[in-house]
Every structure is written in C-alpha cells, then in structure tokens.
Image (cartoon, grey):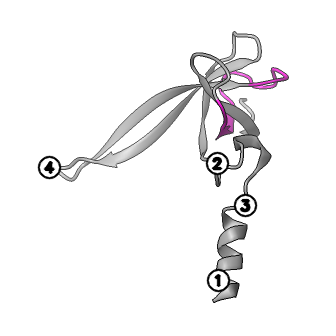
Amino acid sequence: MTGLAESDESVKEASPDNGGRGLPKFLEGYVVSDKMNKSAIIEVTTFRKHAAYGKYVKRSKRYMVHDEVNQCREGDRIRVVECRPLSKNKRWRLSSIIDRAQ
C-alpha cells in the first residue's frame, strides 16, 4: 500500500510554476496576434459532439499568453501552461514553440 501512496505523491508533486497546486494544465494553439509587448493571443480549436444530433462541432476560443522574450510570431503553433493571473486577461504562459510559421 505504501508503494501506491508514494506514486500518488510523485504525480501530485508541485511544480514551481503554479504554486504547489498539483499538475498544471496545457493547451496547444496557433498564434493569431503578436503585436503586444510580451504578450500574444492564441486560438485553440476543439471538436465537441453535439448533444442531440451527435455531429462533431468545431469550437474555437482565444487566450492571452505571456511571452517574456517576444519569440512568438503570427501563425506559430505553440504550447502554453496555466499560471497565476499576470494581468486582467493573462492566465497562460508560453511553454514551447511546436512549429514555426512558414
């Protein structure tokens, strides 16, 4: 039983980015605007199944992301991680750039 408890603790081990509150959430999306200083706006697209008809519907949502060194460019595919509130709208921080725009 102790082996199970130890593995649970390792899963719940806090990262310094989110203040010790378990594992942070990650999102992947495309940069749609990088005109601000140290900020970018990404669009995350998901597919949800319609409750009545069963058809998959595309849903898009935009998030403001903190980009400390202004390395994101419009069209890049990036991965972001949740963090503490950095401003009125920014709750996500740039984790990595997956693909660069052509």
Q: Is residue 98 left or right of residue 51?
A: right
Q: Quadrant of the N terminus?
A: bottom right
Vertical side of 28 occupied by 51: above or below: below
Q: CA distance from mark 4 to mark 1?
A: 41 Å
Q: Quadrant of residue 92?
A: top right
Q: Secondary structure at mark 3?
A: loop
Residue type at tag 4: Ala
Q: Secondary structure at mark 2?
A: loop
Task: Assess disc 2: are there few (<14), some (14-19) or many (≥20) residues with their C-alpha within 10 Å of its C-alpha.
Answer: some
Residue 13 is labelled as: 3
Between circles 2 and 4, the one closer to the viewer is 2
Q: What's the residue at 60%, 41% (across, down)?
A: 28
Q: Where is mark 4, residue-wise? A: 52
Work out whether mark 1 precedes mark 3 in sequence or the reverse, and give the earlier one. Answer: 1
Residue type at tag 2: Pro
Work out whether mark 2 precedes mark 1 in sequence or the reverse, and give the earlier one. Answer: 1
Q: What's the residue at 73%, 34% (across, down)?
A: 94
Are the residues flagged by discs 4 and 1 in contact, CB closer than 8 Å? no
Between circles 3 and 2, the one closer to the viewer is 3
Q: Secondary structure at mark 4?
A: loop
